[in-house]
Amino acid sequence: MPGRSKRKPPEPAAPKSVPQAVVNRLSYYLRELQHLLRQGVQTISSSQLGQRLGFTDAQVRKDLAYFGQFGYPGIGYRCHELAEAIRRILGTDQQWPVALVGVGHLGQALLGYKGFSQQGFVFEAAFDVDPELIGRQLAGIRVYHLDRLPQIVQSHKIRLGIIAVPASAAQAVADRLVESGIQGILNFAPVTITVPPQVSLVGVDLAMELEQLSFSVLHRQRESR
């Protein structure tokens, strides 16, 4: 109707403390909402969203309630609005320049993965110490010697770094990233590293994930006997 005001999309709140499990589930919600939008779905209920991901509707509502109220009576959630709200919460409504250290097989695969840029993470530079790699362009990204790390991080205002080096070099690389001003590190090296409290760290051990998967399959087989 003319002159009728539309409800303004809610701005996500900024709670002081949110359980990490809740933050992890936000990424699942976002991926599913983006998938629904590609299919042309405009609205979804908490029950439907939870069912698609294996969560209860109560869990979905509780998770989102940490950041505000996003549903509409009789409608549920508007997929576009909720996806945009979650992107603001996660910080992916802006682009994040990323530095990659280690351009072996895994590093080159990471550089070629288009999903990072689709979520707002853009590789600005890659680093290695192999003379055969220095100066090359891989997936459109130039490879610099590791000694150039502080300069490139500062000039490109890079805040996130990815480690894809052998385990024996991971801690030294992490130290250099921190010294260069990196504030968040994603570690693919199969080893535990330490960073100062002001630096965020996430470890991804692919072999460990497969171990968890093999355990699940093995014990499910034993229980079915």
Image (cartoon, rainbow, N blue to C red):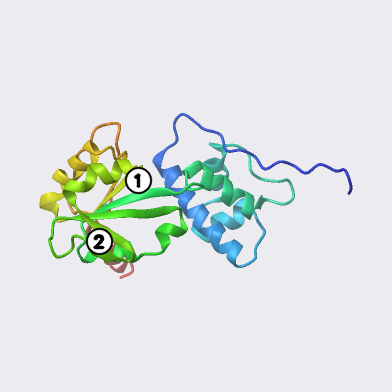
| Residue that carries the numbered disc 2 in the rendered image | 107
Q: Quadrant of the C terminus?
A: bottom left
| Residue that carries the numbered disc 1 in the rendered image | 156
Q: Secondary structure at mark 2?
A: helix
**74 or 191: nearer the eye?**
191
Specify whether 197 is left or right of 35.
left
Name the image quarter holding residue 6.
top right
Specify whether 121 is left or right of 126.
right
Residue 202 image point, x, y percent: 30, 46
Residue 119 image point, x, y percent: 46, 55
Which residue of the protein is positioned furthest toward the right in this rendering? 2
Residue 177 shows up from this direction: yes
Seen at 18% across and 40% down, the residue is 175
Q: Secondary structure at mark 1?
A: loop
Decide: few, some or many residues near mark 1? Use Cα within 10 Å; few <14, some 14-19, many ≥20.
Answer: few
Question: What amino acid is at disc 1?
Answer: His
